Image (cartoon, helix red, strand yellow):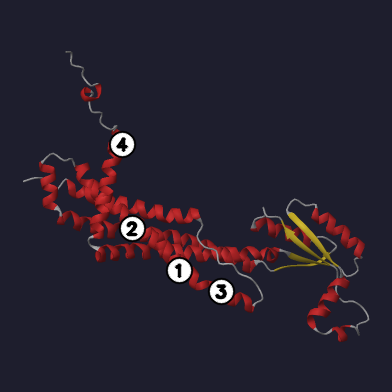
Amino acid sequence: MAVTRNADAVAPVRSSGPVVTWLTRHASTAIGALGRLSRQPFASLMIILVIGVTLALPAAINVVVKNAQSVSGSWDNALDFSVYLQRELSERDAQALASLIGQRADVESVRLVTADQALADFKLQSGFGEALDQLGDNPLPHALIVRPSAGNTTASMTLLQEEIGNLPETDLVQADTEWVQRFHAILDIVRKAIAIFAALLGIAIVVVIGNTIRLDIENRREEIEVTKLIGASNAFVRRPFLWTGFWYGLSGGIVALLLVEYGLFLLKGPVTRLAGLYQGKITVVSLDLAESAAIVGVACFLGLFASWVTAARHMYRIEPR
């Protein structure tokens, strides 16, 4: 009787591909590193809080600047300037001049305010309507409200005002934009200061995580020596510490986002009440998805960088005796 061999029984065992093996090892190491952190919750929580608060400081200042820019976005009218025309100029000539100026490439729009409209508005706002009715002649001239186009720079806006002011029909050009320019200049300074501040705090995070990884390596020195004794490479031994740094960075980044969002939640009530007192509406702008992802990504990178530098430095010093 012939014996038939089962093809499945004699088929060689196929091992997983190199990519699957690499992912499996890293997943196992990541879970193991997370387990080690969970076994010392107090120490891990303190380090995560330090990282979170350190990251939350520049993020919070950035949110403040972002909200200031959002509020200043409604100040476009402050960039307008008023052109007061000669009193003897007729309304028809004033309208023609407004059309002529509006054709310039550096001007977005021109609005004519006639002398009668200006006087009516002044009566309404000043409360001296009855006294102003006693005037025999309207003392106010026609005026143009000129809004420069968005592409103007500070120098081009100054040139525009000078050119309009030199027109024979113009009596006075009044612009009150210096305070807006100063405000935006201050925001630019604060924005650059945030970048410097964030860089310094990033160095602090690297030092904190690096020192933590160094202590962890020293505590596991004997384990590392035994692992190297049986043939493990420096990369294999270094892998758990890299994942430890990653978990520190990821957790710290998430904590930073939570702190910023909680701070904005506390500020929404007072900001809403303040806006109500001025009969306005202010919307508190939070971090968008890209900014949140950037904070978490930077935190993870700092954790990996600090752990890699520290582990690489100490791995070569620990050899089996």
What is the distance, in whole Å, between disc 2 and disc 4 at their CAs? 35 Å
Q: Which residue type does callout 4 highlight? A: Val
Q: Earlier in the sequence, mark 3 or mark 2?
A: 2
Query: Does residue 30 appear to the left or right of 146 in the view shown?
Result: left
Q: Which mark is residue 20?
A: 4
Label 3 is placed on what type of residue? Answer: Val
**Residue drawn at 18 percent across, 40 percent down:** 233
Question: What is the spatial separation of the Cα atoms under label 3 and label 4, in whole angstroms?
Answer: 53 Å
**Residue 308 in view (yes/no):** no
Residue 39, quarter of the rendered image: bottom left
Q: Which residue is mark 1?
A: 262
Q: Which tag, 2 or 4, sits closer to the chain's start?
A: 4
Q: Between tags 4 and 1, which lies in front? A: 4
**What residue is shown with label 2?**
203
Give the mark count. Answer: 4
Distance Cα–Cα, label 3 vs label 1? 14 Å
Give the Cα separation between the discs numbered 2 and 1: 25 Å
Q: Residue, x 63% and y 76% (percent of image)?
A: 276
Q: Nearer the viewer, residue 155 or 210?
A: 210
